[in-house]
Image: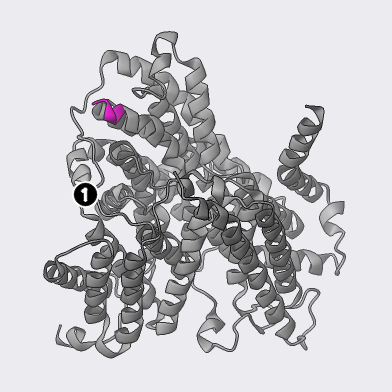
Amino acid sequence: MDVISGLALGFGNALTPINLGWALLGCFLGTAIGVLPGIGPALTIALLLPVTFKVEATGAFILFCGIFYGAMYGGSTTSILLNTPGESGSIITALEGAKMARHGRAGPALVTAAIGSFVAGTVGTLGISFVGPVVVDLALKLGPAEYFSLMVLCFVTVSAVLGGSALRGLASLGFGLMLGLVGIDLQTGQPRLTFGVPELLDGVNVVLVAVALFAVGETMYLAWRHVEGKQEIRPVGRLWMSGSDWRRSIGPWLRGSFLGFPFGVLPAGGTEMPTMLSYYAERKLVRPEHRDEFGTTGAIEGVAGPEAANNAAAAGILVPMLTLGLPTSATAAIMLSAFQSYGIQPGPLLFTEQAPLVWTLIASLYIANVMLVVLNLPLVGLWARILKIPTPQLYAGILVFATIGTYGISNSVIDLVLLYGIGIVAMFMRRFDFPTAPVVIGMILGPMAEQALRQALTISQGDWSTFVTRPISLGILLVAALALLGPRLWGAWRGRAA
Amino acid sequence: MTPPSRTEGTPRADLGAGLFVVLLGLVTLYAAWAIPESPLYAQVGAKPIPTLVGAILVILGLALSATALRGGWSGGLEEEMAAPPVNWRALALLGAGLLVQIALIDALGFVVAATIQYVLVCAAFGSRRPLRDLAIGAAVTLGAYLAFSRLLGVNIGAGVLEGIL
């Protein structure tokens, strides 16, 4: 199916009243929850996974896409008004956005973030529609050996390349891989890492782990460091951009979008790098008379560019998720498990076997994007009010929802013990600066990688050299090795030269 | 200014984190070793991957411990340098909230257990009005229960209040 007829089919499905309702609900929920400091789309979608038992796949994914895009919009509001970025991608937005808000320019910062997100969402969604099918054609040529190598590359990039330290990133990944191993081995039927606990035979639920990492751990960490006092919320002011604001924003929006999208598509998915690059680019490219605003009163370019890059990258992450079945962010990993709970395995065959679903999902991304820009600006007063929920009520509420979402999985107290136990580990991970996203990715991708490894070795009749004798597989592994060791070798070489 | 004792304590704390990763690896290795050899034929059985993951965790943990012994990493974190002292009162109240939930959810049901948890967590974060928290908590947990059980169709089990509804 070509792109145009695919989109026509998708829009036909997505524009029914009930599906529009799902999209609206998703956008609304996503924004509201994205605004809450500290919780993001991964947690929201994880808690709403039970929807998959009740609602047919199309409706559920439209809802999830709305949450996905909505939570990103909401996150920028929090970064600007409260200076507490909800996810790593909006750290840079908080940098300049909070400064603008402090100098009474919260309104223009919010508008440029919202329109920038819309521009980036449009570029990103167009990218998904046109790049997706191309990737599918390439992916169909890959065998299990190549898949395994691709997953190794994914592991390396999400844990060792991004973030503060390769060691800590890889340790987080290892923790995730370990959690993924728990349960009955599907190929031999043997229980693994269950320590004799019958509840663990089915494995550790990914919802439980996501909720433990993102809700329980975060809440515990905040309690650990809690100081009495109120956070200051900056007033929104007038939602209006002057002519000069527009002129200064358009370039950064477009540059940010086109910079961000490829980063999301590569299995090196992640929003930190493109947002940072966009920030530095805008700082270099800004007209001299505005250069002083960076880092002092807040420059609008420093909000427009990174915010667009963040959204475009997040959209790009859907490409490897849908076409290869490779999640490269925590949110994508949770979405993948939603597909699995419908018995659908994302991958190259998804575009042929589930064509209506895929194209409806893509069409609903366009719709969510438009809905958000229409919905978000008039409602910004409401979103700012959500920020006024007092801290005690907010975190007590988050724990209530974390608990009910987990207890609902199997009504087992063992699950709650695991939830709080992993939550304690997550609290220490926060304290010692271990990233949490690799845990979720390792947990989802680990079992898939093991399966690919076993298939590849079955095909090669146990010959491990299959991974390095097949040229594509070797190439991918070399890129992974380069990504892991390159920065260190480079550093050592520079250290010697200096 | 960070008190000098904290700065000295940091590498030791980092060592703890490194050793925890080693422990995790050893547990994984032990569990992998305990998997019986499968009678079924398979090129790669159930054991190799868990063994590999365990070994990787041990190596990473040792490397982290070595980093810790050379001075650690978290002393240089901006967040840690600006961090206030540990709030034991908040942690204790939060911990109590979690324990109450685990202890009571089967006997009294979600709504009652979660309402008590709600009040304790509010207190942990400095709320001084437990009665108001109790009222809000009851409303929030009841709302969450109805949303999950009626709208999402999730079975949240039976309890004291759930039976009446």
Q: How crowded is mark 1: few (under 14 residues within 10 Å), some or many (20 or more)?
A: some
- The image quadrant that residue A270 belongs to is top right
Tell me, yes or no, whether the highlighted magenta stretch contains residue A101. yes
Q: Is A291 drawn above or below residue A219 in the view shown?
A: above
- The residue drawn where x is 70% and y is 70% is B54
* Residues in magenta, as a range: A100-104
Question: In the displayed structure, does residue A379 sit left or right of residue B107?
Answer: left
Residue A495 screen position, x and y as percent = 77, 33
In front here: B157 or A315?
Answer: B157
- The residue drawn where x is 31% and y is 74% is B97
- How does the figure colour the protein chain or chains? one colour
Residue A351 screen position, x and y as percent = 54, 52
- The residue drawn where x is 85% and y is 53% is A468
Q: Is mark 1 on a helix, strand or loop?
A: helix
Question: In the displayed structure, does residue A153 sit left or right of residue B107?
Answer: right
- The residue drawn where x is 16% and y is 67% is B133
Tell me, yes or no, whether the highlighted magenta stretch contains residue A419. no
- Image quarter in which the C terminus of chain B is found: bottom left
Residue type marked 1 = Ile
Residue A322 screen position, x and y as percent = 53, 51
- Image quarter in which the N terminus of chain B is found: top left
**Residue A39 in view (yes/no):** yes
Q: Mark 1 lies on which chain?
A: A
- How many numbered circles does the render carry? 1
Residue sitting at the far top: A289
- The image quadrant that residue A416 belongs to is bottom left
In front here: A204 or A56?
Answer: A204
Q: Is A182 drawn above or below residue B84 in the view shown?
A: below
**Residue A445 in view (yes/no):** no
Q: Main secondary structure of the magenta part?
A: helix
User: Circle 1 is placed at which residue position?
Assistant: A386
